[in-house]
Amino acid sequence: MRRSSSRFGLSESEWNSALTEVRDAILEAARERRMISYGEVASRVSTISLEPHSALMNHLLGTIFEEEHAAGRPALTSIVTHKYGDKEPGSGFYEMARSLGYKFNEPYLFWAAQVQAVFKLHGEPKRT
């Protein structure tokens, strides 16, 4: 499904800039081999006002997940998690994964494998 900015009243330019800012924030965390909270991602977006647990955030993250999947890469959005509580991604992450054709019985194991694959692909080598 091709996602569009039109539902949120954003111009194409605003959508693309916000998407780039979200992706860049996640990639920075991936390079550092660390998780990033929804709130931290939202705070890194200056193009638009973005709430951490909003439909717009879900839409942006879903777009990134779709693009990464289409490019044959692991789920970059797997490292975006709740700041408190379970410190895992929201249920939308698993719903999106299934809609993209991923098959898994144990969501936690699927998620953990995606996180490790993201760190392997994007993470800076560990210094010893």
Image (cartoon, helix red, strand yellow):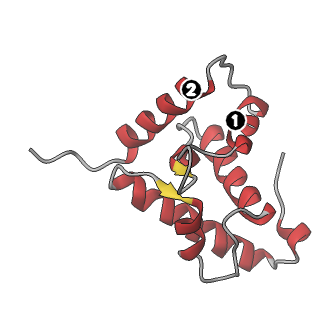
What number is the disc on residue 127? none
**Could you tell me which residue is drawn at 44 percent across and 51 percent down?**
35
Task: Name, please, the residue furthest toward the front.
Answer: 85
**Earlier-in-chain disc, 2 versus 1:** 1
Position above or below: 30 against 106: below
Identified by mark 1, the residue type is Tyr
Q: Quadrant of the C terminus?
A: top left
| Image position of 58 with respect to 66: above or below | below
Locate residue 86 relative to residue 7 in the image: left or right. left
Task: Tell me where residue 53 sits by quadrant.
Answer: bottom right
Locate residue 3 relative to residue 102 in the image: left or right: right
Q: Which of the 4 quarters of the picture holds residue 106?
A: top right
Q: Mark 1 sits on what residue? A: 94
Of the numbered discs in the image, which one, if any, rests on residue 110? 2
Camera-nearest residue between 77 and 51: 51
**Does the residue at mark 2 contact the one at mark 1 (Cβ under 8 Å)?**
yes
Q: Picture quarter containing residue 92?
A: top right
Measured as percent of width and height from the top left, residue 91 is found at: 72, 41
Residue 120: x %, y % from top left: 36, 38
Residue 63, percent from left and from top? 71, 53
Residue count near mark 2 (Cα–Cα under 10 Å), binned few <14, some 14–19, many ≥20: some
Front residue of this view, candidates 111 and 102? 111
**Mark 2 secondary-structure assignment:** helix
Q: Report the Cα–Cα distance between label 2 and label 1.
A: 9 Å
Q: Residue at x 72, y 50 (%)?
A: 62
Residue type, numbered disc 2: Phe
The kind of secondary structure element at disc 1 is helix
Q: Residue visible at 50% across and 47% down? A: 79
Q: Is residue 123 above or below residue 6?
A: above
